Each structure stands twice: as C-alpha cells, then as structure tokens.
Image (spheres, grey):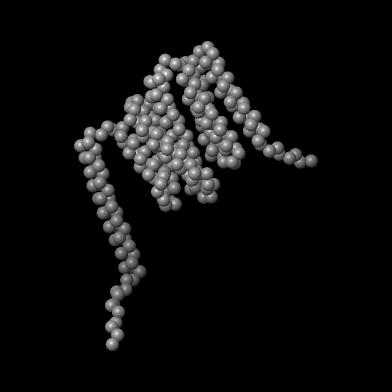
Amino acid sequence: MQSEPPHTPRVGGGGLAMTEMMAKWDVKVLGGLGGALLALAAVFLWRDLHMPVEALLILAAVATLALGFLAVPRGGLLIFPIAVLATSVTGGLWYAATKQPLLLVGLALTFIASVIMLPRSLRRGDTQLERIRDVLVWFGLTAATIATSWTFYFHFLTLGVAEDHIARRLVLTLGWLVIGVVLVFLGRKRGAPVIRDAGFCFVAISVGKTLLYDTAHLDGSLRVAGLAAAGALMLGTAWLSARSTPATPRSS
C-alpha cells in the first residue's frame, strides 16, 4: 500500500494576509529592538574608548563609502548621493567652526565616495528618479570637492607651510575656476546639463571669492595677476565653446 502524503492545511486568502501582516510586524519589532540595542552598545563603546566627537564624521564617511559598493535597491537610488552631500556640507561647516584636524580624514573619505559614484551618473538616466540621482551626484561631488579642498588648503597652507605667503590665496580661486570651466566645457560636449551646472557652481564660487575676498586681501601685481588669469581662463573657455558649437543652418 502506498502511504498517503502528509496533509497540509490550506490557508485561505484571509489567513495569508494575516500571516504576512504578522511576519512584517515581527520583522519591525525584532529589527527595531535589535537596532536599538546595537546603537546603545555603540554609544557605551564610544564612551568607554573616549573617542573624540570628530570621529563621528569619519564613521559617517565610512558608512557613505560602503554604500557606494552595495547593490542598493531601485527605490534607494538617492540614499548614496544624499549621504555624500550631507556629509560634505556637515564636515565643511564643522571644520570651519572648530578647525579640528581629525575632520580632514572624514572629508577626504567623503570626497573619495563622491568620485566613486560618478560612473553611475555618466550612464544617462531614463527615469525621473535616475535624473534626480544624477543631479545629486554631481552636486555632491561639487560640495565634497569644495569642502575638502578648502579644509586641506586652510590646514596645510594657511596654517602650515605657506602661512606667510599671501600668494597662496590664489590657489583655491584658480583651482576652482579651472575645475569649473572644464566641467562647463565637458557638459556642453556631452550634452549633459547637470555637469555644466556643477561647473558653473565652481565658477560662481571662484568669481565670488575673487571679487569679495581676493581683491581686498591681495595687492599690487598679485591682485592684477589673479584677476587677469581668471578673466583669460573664462574668455578662453568661451572661445572654445563657441568654436565647438555647430552652427545652426539658416533657412532660406
């Protein structure tokens, strides 16, 4: 005689819905409690190790960097660029307020994370969410570059080897301007407005620094050289852009 297969109780539609709801509830409760206990353990570990508060930025940067290597679900496309943007702005403002050298590590890691996410945005997004991601990626790179370059400049040049050389003030001005005009030109060549917009952010910050800071804190030949170099660079880029733009055929 053949043995009958074990009887499996059938679950109706209402039973399946109840089971699914209970499973979701279990995940939320257990996951929430587990996360809270882990966070509490981290707080006590942090206190016991006497870690400086600036190390929080390093942890945030490491977490952001880790996100760049994870396969994020489609609904979480914005998490990584938002994290880069938030960490960059927070780190830059934090350093401006405290001048703590440990913050440089977190900002450097954030800059690396902003570069890692660039290849994703170079593939043209088809959906609205992907286009928003591309905007956040490039403006995250802009914020990370400006914050990191300024903090390193201030720590190693203003407070370091070039403290007595006022010519150092042109380093950021011309550096940001070069990055800006390159991105503007690249954005036009690739037909990518978001790259062009990021470039104009660099240009605007550089020109603003030139007019509001450099003209007041530089004198003589340095002031003239800075203004002339910035003007020549932008005129050269304008000329190249005009040369590379195809002429529109005139209708007869």
Q: Is residue 216 above or below residue 53?
A: above
Quadrant position of the N terminus in the picture: bottom left
Q: Give the residue furthest to the right.
A: 252
Residue 108 placement (x, y as % from top left): 39, 34
Q: Is residue 41 above or below residue 6?
A: above
Residue 94 lies left or right of residue 117; in this view the side is left
Q: Within the image, what quadrant is residue 66 found in? A: top left
Number of numbered tags placed on the structure image: 0
Extreme bottom residue here? 1
Is the residue 13 above or below the residue 154 in the image?
A: below
Q: Nearer the viewer, residue 84 or 240?
A: 240
Q: Position of residue 249 (x, y in %)?
A: 73, 40
**Residue at far top of view:** 220
* Quadrant position of residue 107: top left
Residue 156 spot, x, y in % from top left: 39, 24
Residue 24 in which image quadrant: bottom left
User: Which residue is rendered at x = 57% and y = 41% of the image?
Assistant: 192
Residue 241 in percent (x, y) is at 63, 33
Residue 216 shown left or right of residue 243 in the figure:
left
Taking the spot 51% from the left edge, 17% from the top edge, the residue there is 215
- Can residue 158 be seen here? The reply is no
Quadrant where the C terminus is found in the figure: top right
- Residue at 46 percent of width and 39 percent of height: 115
Does any portion of residue 248 appear in the rendered image?
yes
Answer with left or right where residue 110 lies relative to residue 42.
Answer: right
- Residue farthest to the left, as pictured: 48
The residue depicted at 48 percent of the width and 42 percent of the height is 118
